[in-house]
Amino acid sequence: MIVNLIMIALSVSLGVFSILYMLTHRENYGTLTIVLIICLIYLFHGILALPWLTLSVETIFVEDMALSMWKFSIIFRMISLGLIVSLCNFILVYSRLSFSLTFIYCFLLGIITSLLSLPNSIEITRVGNYYNYVFLNPVLLVLIIAFDFYIIGLLFFTVTTNLSAIRNPLLGRLLFIFVFYFAIVFLNHIIYITTQNILFKGINYMLNIIGSISIIYTLLKMPEFFVVLTNKIYDFIIFQKSGILLYSYNFETGKETDESLLKGSILIGINHILTNFTYKKDQLNLIKMKDRDIVFEYDTYYGYALLLITNQKNAIIENAVKHFMQSFNDLNKDQLKKIENYGQLIDISVFKNAKVLINENFYPYLKKSKGRLR
């Protein structure tokens, strides 16, 4: 009993800490959607599923209550597994799962939940000081096992099909390790609920706690891991509306560039900016090309525009651009006013302070990202 209470306290503490940390540091993880998914995973798995699974074997509860906790732990766990797949999909390609895959998940979840609600689906027996559970309905057990293998298959499929496109090979390997670890946790859980072996019960607790701690460590030390791993930025350029290049940075080389190296899609975007500057409203605009998105934003007050080339525009990049421009304006407002209001020529090297702002706002996309929290 004491050991189980310690495991519950540890699981709940890790879950609560993770949720509070995510909510108070949500700006480090791209979008609110990703933050909410991670919080829900810790809620359903660390705070609900694992503690209820642990308590359900304790004979201090009457059999009906213990059986209900066992069944609910299965449902909560299945919800958390679906959230894990959604998180994996979001941090890889920033999109929801396809309708067909989501339908299969919901169908299995619905059938299993319905079977669990039947009175004779699971039998509870007392063995010493603990309860054991036996699946009387073999279809229910088969569906639960099939569900776990479906989740494992989705995770491996999502990762392997996008592995080569991940911008940082280190993050790609880390993601694959996590997926492999989750597969081991899932398989051990299947063995435990099938055999009720106390050894696999202990292994199940330890694997879940170790996995939770590993994710927390990644949240603290590598927040870029949760910012769309396949999303890349190629070029970042700031132009004054008269056509003067204020600053340019290439994310592929990790170096600042000069005007003579700008060509192709960059010049198309710059031409569009200069042509439509006075007609631009206060929102991001976009030029879509075959394998590039040219994102640009204007500041009509200070008379400059920002151009960014990426493989996919999303809310994470939009937010980073807006935060960058706010900081850039605060840092360089005097120099920008001189150019805009008085037409004064100044040394544009003063705008090299933009590199610091790029590191702050676009750190997940840098060639050798160190992250702000390290």
Image (tube, helix red, strand yellow):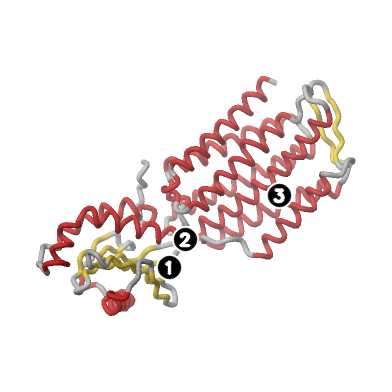
Amino acid type, mark 3: Asp
**Which element type, helix, strand or loop, lies under badge 1?**
loop
Q: Nearer the viewer, residue 144 or 318?
A: 318
Left or right: 132, with 89 as reference point: right
Q: Residues within 10 Å of mark 1 (few under 14, many from 20)?
A: some
The image quadrant that residue 276 belongs to is bottom left
Mark 2 lies on a secondary structure that is loop
Mark closer to the observer (3, 1): 1
Q: What amino acid is labelled 1 in the image?
A: Asn
Q: Which residue is mark 2?
A: 230
Q: Position of residue 75 (x, y in %)?
A: 73, 44
Name the one closer to the observer, 226 or 326.
Answer: 326
Give residue 311's mark: 1
CA separation in Å, label 2 and label 3: 26 Å
Q: Looking at the figure, which quarter contains the C terminus?
A: top left
Q: Residue at x 62, y 36 (%)?
A: 47
Q: Position of residue 229 (x, y in %)?
A: 47, 57
Labels 3 and 1: the sequence-earlier one: 3
Q: Earlier in the sequence, mark 2 or mark 3?
A: 3
Q: Which residue occupies 83% across, 31% down?
A: 64
Q: Quadrant of the N terminus?
A: top right
Please rate how many residues cluster around mark 3, counting C-alpha atoms within 10 Å: few if below 14, some from 14 to 19, many from 20: some
The local crowd at label 2, few if under 14, some if 14 to 19, many if 20 or more residues have their Cα within 10 Å, is many
Q: Which residue is mark 3?
A: 148
Q: From the viewer's perspective, is 94 left or right of 313? A: right
SS state under label 3: helix
Q: Are marks 2 and 1 in contact (CB under 8 Å)?
A: yes
Where residue 295 sits: x, y (%)? 37, 69
Residue, x 76% and y 54% (percent of image)? 108
Name the residue nearer the viewer: 128 or 62: 62
